[in-house]
Amino acid sequence: MFIAATVAILLTMAFAIARMCVGPTIYDRILAVNMFGTKTVLLIAVLGYLSGRPDFLDIALVYALINFIGTIAVLKFLRYGGFGDTHDMEDSAGSPDTEPR
Amino acid sequence: MTEVMSHFNYLVVVVLMMTGFYIVIAKSNLVKKVVGLNIFQVSVFLLYISMGKIFGGTAPILDDRFTVYSNPLPHVLILTAIVVGVATTALAGALIVRVHEAYGTIEEDEIHRQDGDA
Amino acid sequence: MIEAVNTLLLLFMCVTAFTIVRQNNLFAVVMLGSVFSLLSAGMFVMLDAVDVAFTEAAVGAGISTILMLGVLSLTKSRERVTFGTPTLPILLVLISGAVLVYSALGMPEFGSADAPIHQHVADRYIEQSGTEVGLPNIVTSVLASYRGFDTLGEVTVIFTAGIGVMLLLGLRRRTTERGAIEEPPAPGEGHMRHHLVLRVTAKLLIPFILLFALYVQFHGDFGPGGGFQAGVIFAAAFVLYALVFGIKNALTVVPEWVTRFLIAAGVLLYAGVGVASLFMGGNYLDYGVLAHEPTHGQHLGILLIEFGVGTTVAAVMITLFLSFARRARKKT
Amino acid sequence: MEMVNDIIVWALLLTGSVFAIIGGIGILRLPDVYTRLHGAGITDTMGAGLILLGLAVHEGFTLITVKLFLIFAFLINTSPVSSHAVANAAHGAGVRPLLDDDLETDKATGSGDPA
């Protein structure tokens, strides 16, 4: 039964990668990466059962936490063009949100 | 064909390694070169970890239920290499930032051109 | 089944790598890089390297992506478009690839237990470390005890990289082209002020992340984890705080002198444990002499040096983030 | 008892998998960012939640269940927030949702082209 779940998760990952590669806007990519992250969490959790040793869920737990931070960082970068306090919209002349493709 | 299947991991490692290598030598953008180096680095990690795997073995954390463990030595080497890798990536990033401040570009050939003029 | 998952993940990795080659938008390249690292962590779990997967999880998806974005925010986010493929690099890559494929086929089969790599020290680590060091996690035993000197070197490399980034980016204060030092906004005025949802969730999560970092730090002897991973997770919590509440507020939580002090303190603690074991009659970093019983000494020594590793890694990662985040973008 | 347990685990894992795949198809096939958020949302909440619940039922009550529950708690907290932030950022950057009028002019590609 874990095999079924693994196959489903891998299939979803493939869809996410396809969306990630196709784009078209950067927000599609962020969405796909974020979803890919949660699918990795699930994959690691299920793989533990598949290999008969499910006590390594800490890795999945780390992903669940870090993935969120990564997404927030990406969005802050897009919105303000940087991570500092002085970075604001007028400062972000070269940031990708002026060229969404 | 069985030869290929039994060495599949190593072959993919070679493909990834060459992809990273190609980015490093063919692309002139410095940020992309760093990403290429990262790909190369991950492929080396995979090579090491693949060599340490034993079929039927389990993760090298002792437990009474298991007797066969995968080789822990590559894990130790790669574990530290990953953290060192991110530190060197940061150093490369800092250098790129300084290069951009000095030359106004992060394309390698433009930097060479500016140096040639000076 | 395991082989099938293995093959699929490797194929995904290849697809991602090829997309990176062809993608011109550097931002997308960085995002793809983070997917690549997620995939490699999945591979590491497949190949039984849980500790490595743990590190890659903490480093690749979070800190690494954030650092690359920091670089992009200070430079350009778009590669200049080039047409056609250069022949010389392709040729070079194909030739060296062919050589590597040829030699890869000469390697022992994947997963075989008779490969030369398993014949030497690994046996001893697996069979003896349980009694010699007394820890279930062999990786931690080897990392901190058998190869402790090597790890000290790695920690020093991280220390040096932190100092290097500080020298390259940190010294010139936030002077912009206008010549004025810009005052950051006052507390509460920081960015993401109107992102109420984010602020609440971040407040909710940060204590758990810190707690989890401590768990990883001190549970690393028994399960996957240890100083390297814990340090990165701890730094990630700080980064989240700085992102949501602004750098200035973050600096009131952990002032700069504290991180600078901790960068050195961790390495010093590690090396100090070695010196202590010298004084107590053992070899350098031989923890057996630290307590009256060798395994207790090993436990104590590993706990201390892992703590040193965690301190340095966390402080260096925080410094790296701050160096990139605080540098003002040069007007071009 | 064993069999009842197994049946429940099977049901939970399979429903979770179905939700995950539906979300995956959604993220691939839906026309623009805002609609694709639905696809991502369903995999992150229902898909992940049911699969993790299935694993927890399989495990009984141990430390592993606690960790599974923690993963679930974090996912259920963070993924809607990420989706919200993505939508917010996309809206702030001026990506327009695809409306009926756009579909009539641009129905062939199905790509969410920002204005």
Image (cartoon, coloured by chain):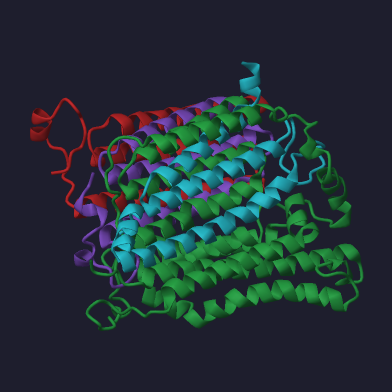
Chain colours: A purple, B cyan, C green, D red
* Horizontal side of residue C225 vs A34, given as left or right: right
- Whether residue D7 is visible here, answered yes or no, is no
The one nearer the camera, C14 or C99, is C99
The quarter of the image holding the N terminus of chain C is top right
The quarter of the image holding the C terminus of chain C is bottom left
Name which quarter of the figure residue D40 lies in.
top left
* Horizontal side of residue B27 vs D72, given as left or right: left
* Horizontal side of residue B2 vs D115, given as left or right: right
At a point 64% along the width and 65% down the height, the residue shown is C155
The one nearer the camera, A1 or C157, is C157
Position of residue B82 relative to residue A14, above or below, is below
- Whether residue C93 is visible here, answered yes or no, is yes
What x and y, as percent, mark residue D60? 65, 39
What x and y, as percent, mark residue C104? 64, 31
Name which quarter of the figure residue C189 lies in.
bottom left
At a point 70% along the width and 65% down the height, the residue shown is C152
At a point 49% along the width and 49% down the height, the residue shown is B37
* Outermost residue toward the front in this view: B117
